[in-house]
Image (cartoon, grey):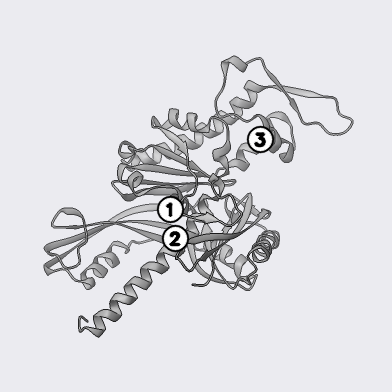
Amino acid sequence: MDPIVVMEIGTSRMRVLVGDVRDDGELVISAVGDSQSSGMRKGEVFHFMSASQCLERALRQAEDMADVKVNEVHLALSGAQIVGVPNRAEISVGEEITAAHVEQVLAEAREIKLPDDREILKSIVGPFSVDGMSGVQPEGLMGQRLAVDVLLIHSRKSHMRNLARLAQELHLKVADILFSGLCAALSTLTAEQKLSGALLIDLGGGTTDYIAYAQAKAAAAGALGVGGYHLTNDIAQAFCLSTNEAEELKIQHGDALMSAAERTKRVPLPVGPGRPPRAAKLSDLQHVIHLRMEETFALIRERLEEAKVLNLLGEGVILTGGGAHLKNVTALAEMVFGLPCKVGVPHSVSGLNINLAKPEYATGVGAILHVYKSAGQRQKQSVWKRLGHWFGFS
């Protein structure tokens, strides 16, 4: 199998990951190229050449580390305009359910009317039901009615095409475009967590993606146009700092909760050459951060309440992305959602001399896993099809 190459085009970072399948079938990440982003805002391209140069730097790093020449990539996409819509389709069968019936009900479930400027990014297939019994493998069963639930994730066409053009500008073929939130969930959530119900929130630089699972199916998903960059900007405005100074202050002293014990504590503010020293109350910094993060979590909670999913999340909340490093962010999430919360890191894959057990790698590793598993499923289907032809089953 050829190397799997994934591009994660974010507001704050551009990452290119290369995955290799060893002879024993083990998947390993052989390279990670990483570059600071420019020309991106809320997951969208606003300056094409700047974004292209940043992506090229990450690509060349990955190529050098893996000693490969990349020709084809898979894109992991985020953005404020991504929306998840649940849909259900049901057809009459009245006989043995065949592969054709399954394809028919899936096709009907994916048929929704969208505005002309929107396009389906991903359809996540949930459980099938036969005559009201859910969670079945329908092919070969007898039944009157076949139904399926899907979660359709759609985005603006121009958004997807602009990101694809960044890769094409580097003479790369775009094999697929993936939803970042789904990728992060794939690398961090277990089958047991999805069955019990879990909410994955990916805290990125310019966007916050989320996807909720209930009874093993994807029940809600979407994205907000707010992330770590907006938190940094809030700090910059509140304390009259540059963006770089505010980012440094956030990293050193940031806290999602306000501490009464540290109400009078002061922290030094960055100052330029020749300027007098300045300081601010730590509680004021905590207040700025708390308000932004609380608002972000509250918006997601509101959407889940509308989708009637919140009460089905037995496993609670899992945070990924760079924002998951923020002090006490899990405690704040527990307060807002009324559910247990923890930080999620990638599993089921290893890296060659790369520490991947960090929340910021959840999307990239999940995208590699998605491509790997999809290729395996296609290979299995091809084998069964050939066997059926040889033995007269088709």
Residue 116 visible in the snapshot: no
Question: In the rendered structure, which disc, 1 or 3, sits on the residue that comes first in sequence?
Answer: 1
- Residue 186 is labelled as 1
- Report the side of 187 relative to 270 (left or right): left
Question: In the rendered structure, which disc, 1 or 2, sits on the residue that comes first in sequence?
Answer: 1
Residue at figure coordinates x 59%, y 31% from the top left: 289
What's under tag 1, amino acid-wise? Answer: Leu
- The secondary structure type at the circle numbered 3 is helix
- Report the side of 229 relative to 121 (left or right): right
Q: Where does label 3 land, which residue?
A: 251
Marks 1 and 3, Cα distance to the nearest angstrom? 28 Å
* Disc 2 residue crowd, few under 14, some 14–19, many 20+, Cα 10 Å: some
- The secondary structure type at the circle numbered 1 is helix
* Disc 1 residue crowd, few under 14, some 14–19, many 20+, Cα 10 Å: many
What's under tag 3, amino acid-wise? Answer: Ile
Q: Where does label 2 land, which residue?
A: 370
